[in-house]
Image: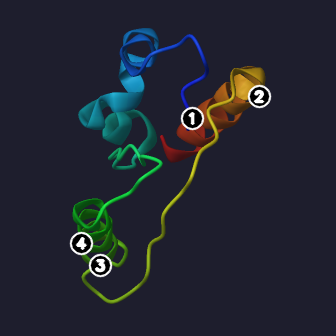
Amino acid sequence: MRVSAGRSQQAILEETPQLFDNERLKQDYMVDGYFKKLERDINSSSIAMITYWYSMWSHRRNGLWKGFLQVNLDSADDKKAKSILIAKKEKCQ
């Protein structure tokens, strides 16, 4: 997600704290959510961290692959996304 001109990362955190609360994500949607801001000039440390997370958490203990999900957080899609998430949550209960 790119931070729009005139907005800050702090503003996004304050507006949507639930997106950054892993316990809540796990409880509500049965997913783990971890965030890494990708800078324009990504460095070797960032690449190493991303590689580590991918190698450690992209499969289950039984060898089945999970996956990574990239979510575009365009507010124009919020209403539709919310209805999809609510429907999925209801299926899981």
CB atoms of marks 3 and 4 within 8 Å: yes
Mark closer to the observer (2, 4): 4
Using the image, tell me which numbered label, if any, was put on residue 80.
2
Residue that numbered label 4 is attached to:
52
Residue that numbered label 1 is attached to:
2
Q: CA distance from mark 1 to mark 2?
A: 20 Å
Mark closer to the observer (1, 4): 1
Dividing the picture into quadrants, the one containing residue 87 is top right
Q: CA distance from mark 3 to mark 2?
A: 32 Å
- 10 Å neighbourhood of mark 1: few (<14), some, or many (≥20)? few
Q: Residue lying furthest bottom in this view?
A: 63
Q: CA distance from mark 3 to mark 4?
A: 5 Å
Q: Amino acid at mark 2?
A: Lys
- 10 Å neighbourhood of mark 4: few (<14), some, or many (≥20)? few
In the image, 81 versus 47, the foreground residue is: 47
Label 2: state its secondary structure.
Answer: helix
In the image, 64 versus 51, the foreground residue is: 51
Describe residue 80's horizontal placement relative to residue 82 as left or right.
Answer: right
Residue that numbered label 3 is attached to:
55
CB atoms of marks 1 and 3 within 8 Å: no
Q: Amino acid at mark 3?
A: Ser
